[in-house]
């Protein structure tokens, strides 16, 4: 009973911090523009789970981030990529009874627009509204416990309390959604695993990612190379700025 109360308290604290963060940043506008800033919650499930993908590759700066779980959806690999290089990209598809773990980011309107543009919305992906359960990852089963606590707070048919409204990305074409998944590259899977481990998603989910058999590619793919190149570029830029 004590542990259950502690887990419930941690969820409420996380939600409180998320809300307070939004309120405090909304009210701090500069002198040139007194209008309130708009924020969007974005649930990342693929390479964007790795914070470096967001900051180094996409050049956005999340206001807040947390591990999260999405119910009645599955991780899919149904957005076509380049054969033998990056055969497919991940997406989220509705699937009753299944769950997908990821990272929920709070983004400014401008950064959210950048994410949409660089992800190919609306051509490769379409925005998909959802409600996610945030949790403090511990690399064990914190997400599962957070979800159980939220379910106990709500009815079995509708989950509202203890969740965050967010946008995520779904394959834009109906034929992609209906088609079987195309195994992704080893490099792309490595970036997903990197992000999952960074935010300490549930151990079983990370093991599931590691168990995915990669598709046939020339080498391992280029997803990791793209990310490390962006990281090195940003590091070099930071060093150069110190001498200016």
Image: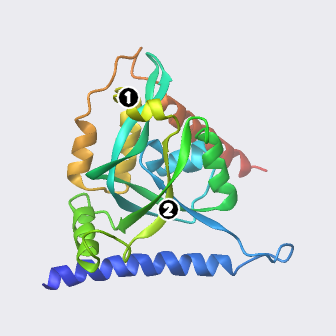
Q: Is residue 71 visible?
A: yes
Q: Which residue is mark 1?
A: 179
Left or right position of 42 against 189:
right
Is 114 located above or below residue 164 in the figure?
A: above
- Viewer-side residue, 121 vs 50: 121
Q: Residue at x 22, y 70 (%)?
A: 148
Q: How far apart are labels 1 and 2 at the CA level?
A: 26 Å
- Viewer-side residue, 124 vs 205: 124
Is 241 located above or below residue 136 in the figure?
A: above
x, y (%) of residue 43?
Answer: 46, 56
Quadrant in which residue 16 is drawn: bottom left
Query: Residue 166 shows which numbered tag?
Result: 2
Q: Is residue 224 visible?
A: no
- Viewer-side residue, 213 vs 182: 182
Q: Rate crowding at label 1 as few (under 14), some (14 to 19) or many (20 or more) other CA atoms within 10 Å.
A: few
x, y (%) of residue 71?
Answer: 32, 58
Q: Which colour scheme appears in the figure?
A: rainbow
Q: Residue at x 46, y 24 (%)?
A: 86
């Amino acid at each position: 009973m004590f542990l259950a109360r502690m887990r419930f308290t941690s969820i409420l604290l996380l939600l409180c911090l998320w809300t307070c963060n939004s309120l405090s940043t909304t009210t701090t506008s500069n002198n040139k523009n007194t209008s309130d800033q708009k924020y969007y919650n974005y649930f990342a499930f693929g390479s964007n789970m790795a914070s470096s993908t967001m900051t180094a590759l996409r050049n956005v700066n999340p206001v807040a981030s947390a591990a999260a779980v999405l119910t009645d959806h599955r991780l899919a690999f149904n957005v076509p990529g380049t054969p033998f290089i990056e055969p497919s990209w991940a997406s989220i598809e509705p699937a009753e009874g299944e769950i997908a773990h990821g990272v929920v980011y709070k983004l400014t309107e401008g950064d959210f627009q950048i994410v949409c543009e660089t992800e190919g919305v609306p051509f490769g992906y379409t925005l998909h509204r959802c409600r996610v359960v945030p949790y403090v990852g511990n690399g064990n089963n914190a997400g599962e416990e957070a979800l159980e606590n939220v379910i106990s707070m709500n009815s079995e048919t509708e989950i509202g309390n203890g969740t965050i409204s967010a946008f995520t990305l779904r394959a834009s074409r109906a034929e992609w959604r209906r088609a079987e998944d195309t195994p992704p590259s080893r490099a792309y899977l490595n970036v997903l695993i990197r992000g999952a481990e960074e935010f300490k998603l549930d151990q079983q989910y990370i093991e599931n990612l590691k168990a995915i058999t990669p598709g046939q590619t020339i080498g391992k793919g280029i997803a990791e190379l793209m990310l490390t190149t962006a990281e090195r570029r940003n590091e070099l830029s930071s060093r150069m700025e110190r001498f200016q």
